[in-house]
Image (spheres, rainbow, N blue to C red):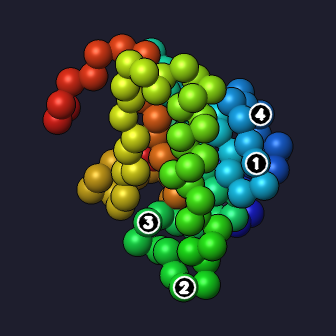
Amino acid sequence: MSDCIFCKIINGEIPSKKVMENDDFYAFYDINPVAKVHVLVVPKKHVANISAITDDNQKYVAGILPFIRDVVAKLGLADDGYRVIFNTGEKAGQTVFHMHAHILGGQELDWPN
Ligand code: 5GP
Ligand code: ZN
C-alpha cells in the first residue's frame, strides 16, 4: 500500500534498523522502544491486522510464529522470556494498520500492564 509506513520500511523508502528477514517477513527495531528490547515483525505483503486475514491472504502471514521464534533466538531472548503482542484495532492501540507483532524483552515485564 503506497501510503503505509511499514510498506515503505519494507521497500527501503523509510530507513530502519533490521534484525533479520526472510522471503515473507521483516524484523526491525521499534523507533520508540517501550522495553529494553523492542522489535517489530511485519509480513512483507500488506495485511491490515489479524482481523483482515482472509482465505486469500492468509498464506502471507501463516508463517509468522516460526519467524518470531527465530527472531527471538537471534536476539537471545528465548531463555529469559519475552512477550509477543499484536495490537489489533484502534481501541487496542493499533496506530499502524499493517499487521505487526511487537516482541518485548531484555527486562522483567509486568503483567497485565
Ligand atoms: P502499534 O501502536 O500500531 O501497535 O505499533 C506501531 C509501532 O510502530 C509503534 O511502537 C511505533 O513506535 C512504531 N513505529 C512507528 N513509526 C515507525 C517508524 O518509522 N520506524 C520504526 N522503526 N518504528 C515505527
Ligand atoms: Zn503496509
The alpha-carbon separation of the residues under discs 4 and 1 comes to 18 Å
Q: Which label's residue is closer to the chain start, 4 or 2?
A: 4
Q: Nearer the viewer, mark 3 or mark 4?
A: 3
Q: Which label's residue is closer to the chain start, 1 or 3?
A: 1
Q: Which label's residue is closer to the chain start, 3 or 4?
A: 4
Mark 3: which secondary structure? helix
Quadrant showing the C terminus: top left
Asked if residue 46 can be seen in this view, the reply is yes
Q: Position of residue 24 (x, y in %)?
A: 72, 57
Other residues around mark 3 within 10 Å, as few (<14) / some (14–19) / many (≥20): some
The alpha-carbon separation of the residues under discs 1 and 2 comes to 22 Å
Task: Please identify the quarter of the rendering in which residue 9 is found.
Answer: top right
CB within 8 Å, label 3 to label 4:
no
Q: Nearer the viewer, mark 3 or mark 2?
A: 2
- Pointer 3 residue: 50
Q: Decide if residue 62 is on the left or right side of residue 91.
A: right
Q: Which label's residue is closer to the chain start, 4 or 1?
A: 4
Q: Which label belongs to residue 15?
A: 4
Between residue 85 and residue 75, name the one nearer to us: 75
The alpha-carbon separation of the residues under discs 1 and 3 comes to 20 Å
Residue drawn at x 60%, y 47% is: 67
Between residue 100 and residue 107, name the one nearer to us: 107
Q: Which label belongs to residue 77?
A: none
Mark 4: which secondary structure? loop
Q: Is residue 96 above or below residue 70?
A: below
Task: Please identify the quarter of the rendering in which residue 64 is found.
Answer: bottom right
Residue drawn at x 74%, y 63% is: 2
Mark 1: which secondary structure? loop
Residue drawn at x 38%, y 19% is: 80
- Pointer 2 residue: 55
